[in-house]
Amino acid sequence: MEQRQFGNTDLTTSAIGFGTWALGTTQYGEIDVEEAGDALQQAIDAGITLVDTAEAYGPNFCEEILGKALGDRRKDVVLVTKVGFVVDEDNKITGRSSRPDHIIAHADGCLERLDTDWIDLLLIHWPDVNTPFEESMRALEALKEAGKIRHYGVSNYTVPMMKECEKYGHLTANQVGYNLLDRRVEKEVLPYCLEQGIGFMAYGSLAFGLLAGAFDENTSFVDWDWRSRGNAFGLPLFERENMLKTIRAVDRLKTFAADHGHTVAQLALAWVLSHPAVTVGLVGIRNPQELQENVAAASWKLSDDDKAEIDRIMQEEGVPTYRDAEQAI
């Protein structure tokens, strides 16, 4: 497995990261937790050294099962988690908070649920515009000085937000959605991260299943699956007409990928990893079969001609890529 460095820091991990959002939510289809735990163990064996989670996944549930699943293999991975949400007595997310006391208290909660003495990379999950970024950064610095975290960063932050944060410390990473369909970060975020030595973690690399190759024109989602609402982080990816266009393009991309000895899911992940600013492509791995497919994607180095052909297929099928749309915050 290829290893990559987070910007100009000393943090190095596998190019593919084990994403756990689907494992920690009941809004993403049915998940076999035991099978996913087996996949995690096999992922580590296969060279995947980064595991990404968040207190909001569940909430809290994902961190708890991940801590148990890792066991004595905790030392073999770079563990990433996120804080920054307010949860009520009914365990429902009600808002965001990046106040210093909130960050510090919730980081302690993450440590307890993950059953670990340290977090390798702690991220603020979504921007809290009501708290000065200076205060949030000082809280992260305090956690680092206390030895509770090794590195810190943000998630879903724009360039102006990162610039403000960088006045008070150095961000190791920004984690934002990025895939063949959602290219909003190409305009500003990715160039800025590359220039400033900030690692970039891409989530939604397979467009939340759209680019995995398993959907067809009859695919639909149950009410409790978040994709049933049509919207994906501010983009209408799952609205019926858009979804059908993407499915038609994916069918053609399957043939293109097969001609190169790969699957369309491997194509989508290899495309994300081909950007020079991307450090890690996160994928949800729910079983050993998905693991094998995702690991193989890291070895496929797309050429400029390959990427041009992918774009041509997308354009011919009328699939929008939303490069100029506003980033969801």
Image: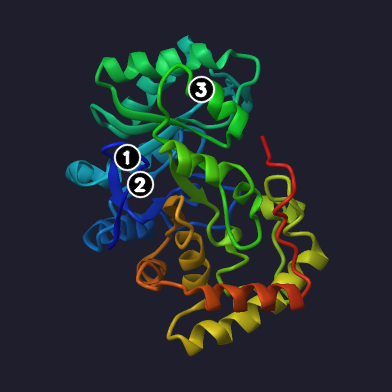
Tell whether label 1 touches label 2 (CB within 8 Å): yes
Cα distance between the residues tagged 1 and 3: 22 Å
Q: CA distance from mark 3 to mark 2?
A: 25 Å
Amino acid identity at mark 3: Cys
x 33%, y 17%: residue: 143
Circle 3 sits in a helix, a strand or a loop, which is it? helix
Mark 3 Cα-neighbour bin, 10 Å: few <14, some 14–19, many ≥20: many
Q: Position of residue 72 (x, y in %)?
A: 17, 43
Q: Position of residue 265 (x, y in %)?
A: 51, 71
Mark 2 neighbour class, 10 Å CA radius: few under 14, some 14 to 19, many 20 or more = many
Q: Look at the numbered disc 2 and give the secondary structure of its residue.
A: strand
Mark in front: 3 vs 2: 3
Q: Residue furthest bottom?
A: 259
Horizontally, is 105 left or right of 321 in the view? left
In this picture, residue 16 sits left or right of residue 220: left
**Mark positioned earlier in the residue sequence (3 or 2):** 2
Tag 1: residue type?
Leu
In the picture as drawn, the residue positioned furthest to the right comes out as 241
Q: Quadrant of the N terminus?
A: bottom left
| Numbered tag placed on residue 26 in the rendering | none
Image location of residue 69, percent across then percent down? 29, 47
Vertical relation: 133 (above or below) 266: above
Q: Amino acid at mark 2?
A: Val
Q: Residue at x 42, y 30 (%)?
A: 171
Q: How is the image coloured?
A: rainbow
From this view, report whether residue 296 is shown above or below residue 61: below
Of callouts 2 and 1, the N-terminal one: 2
Q: Which residue is mark 2?
A: 51
Residue corresponding to mark 1: 79
Within 10 Å of disc 1 (Cα), the crowding (few <14, some 14-19, many 20+) is many
The residue that label 3 is drawn on is: 165
